[in-house]
Image (cartoon, rainbow, N blue to C red):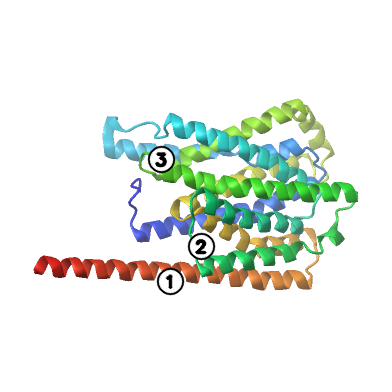
Amino acid sequence: MEDKGLSTKMRRILLLVNCLILAVGVCGGPLMMRLYYVGGGSRVWLSSWLQTGGWPLTLIPLAILYFYRRKSEGANAKFCLITPQIFIVSFVIGVGTGIDNFLYSWGGSKLPVSTSSLLLAAQLGFTAVGAFFIVKLKFTPYSINAVILLTVGAVLLGIRSNGDKPEGVTSKAYVLGFIMTLLAAALYGVILPSIELIYLKAKQAITVTLVLEIQIVMCFAATAFCTIGMVANKDFQAISREANQFNLEEARYYTVIVWTAIIWQCFFVGAVGVIYCSSALMSGVIIAVLLPVTEVLAIVFFSEKFSGEKGVSLFLSLWGFVSYFYGEFKQMKKQKNKSSDTEMTTTQIESV
């Protein structure tokens, strides 16, 4: 489990688990954030803080993995595996994540859930470009097709979002929120490949423990950044007052706060897990393909309209998803055949 050289079967299982965890965060995070604002919440810094404030939950699997190492390695087991260099880089990326959280929360306070598709659509494009320049990702016709289809499909989700402008939001605030979400998309499109670059450049084995340690440092840094914002904006003093005025009652206010933090943590843990098992682009594709699910949930819980553009977007998103994984399947089959040919050639040479 702690070995970098995971078997293909174990890596696929781990990838599936991380995809499911990421799905919970991608679908639930925006909905919980919108529920906070719809219920009467208005503290943008608090909403930003909640996106990474659940980082202590990561200590649970870390503790389990530590005891596992103690059992197998004895007293020689290290308490933590992260090096000072990786810690510093992870902390810097975490501060960037904190800035991204604020941009996204500010935009989310002015836009309906359906418009979050604009963020995710742009994020996929930025992630693809960022992965190309930062980690030298090689595109295939299938991955290019998937990026184009998923981007177009997601953009279609937000085409008529202006008609869904939340009550009380001015046109100026709406446009500013739109710009903030795009800036958040651009920044996160750089963050995902940067995490992958840490894995590639690390001068040590990349284990599940190290991945979680990097994640916890990033989330701690992002939370610290947002905590400074909360202190400056006096959000801590306003929490009890906001809870009393919450439309869904005070007890449910704190329930929303706690579950928002938990669900957003699923997003970040799932994202870095998918990058570990596959790539930054794969993480971006999973996020984008879940857009239609988020859209349907928004329609169910917030009574948002389902237009023809959203139906077309659903079709394009599913098409892009199939295209990407068909390309991955062909690539894996090609590599497997190549390995078999190499082994056969080696055997023939040895027999001679």
Disc 1 to disc 2, how far (Cα)?
14 Å
**Nearer to me, 200 or 248:** 200
The x and y percentages for residue 189 are 61, 50
Look at 79% across and 46% down and name the residue there.
Answer: 109
Q: Splitting the image into 4 quarters, where does residue 150 fall?
A: bottom right
**What numbered label is drawn on residue 139?**
2
Look at 76% across and 43% down and name the residue there.
Answer: 106
Q: Is residue 30 left or right of residue 318?
A: right
Disc 2 to disc 3, how far (Cα)?
24 Å
The x and y percentages for residue 16 are 47, 59
Q: Is residue 244 left or right of residue 317?
A: right
Q: Name the N-terminal-most of marks 2 and 3.
A: 2
| Residue 79 vertical placement versus 248 (above, below) | above
The x and y percentages for residue 26 are 62, 54
The residue tagged with tag 1: helix, strand or loop? helix
Look at 89% across and 51% down and name the residue there.
Answer: 171
Q: Nearer the viewer, mark 1 or mark 2?
A: 2
Question: Can see residue 53?
Answer: no
Question: Can see residue 351?
Answer: yes
Circles 1 and 3 in contact, beta carbons < 8 Å = no
| Tag 1 residue | 330
Three-letter amino acid code of the residue under disc 3: Ala
Q: Splitting the image into 4 quarters, where does residue 165 fall?
A: bottom right
| Tag 3 residue | 202
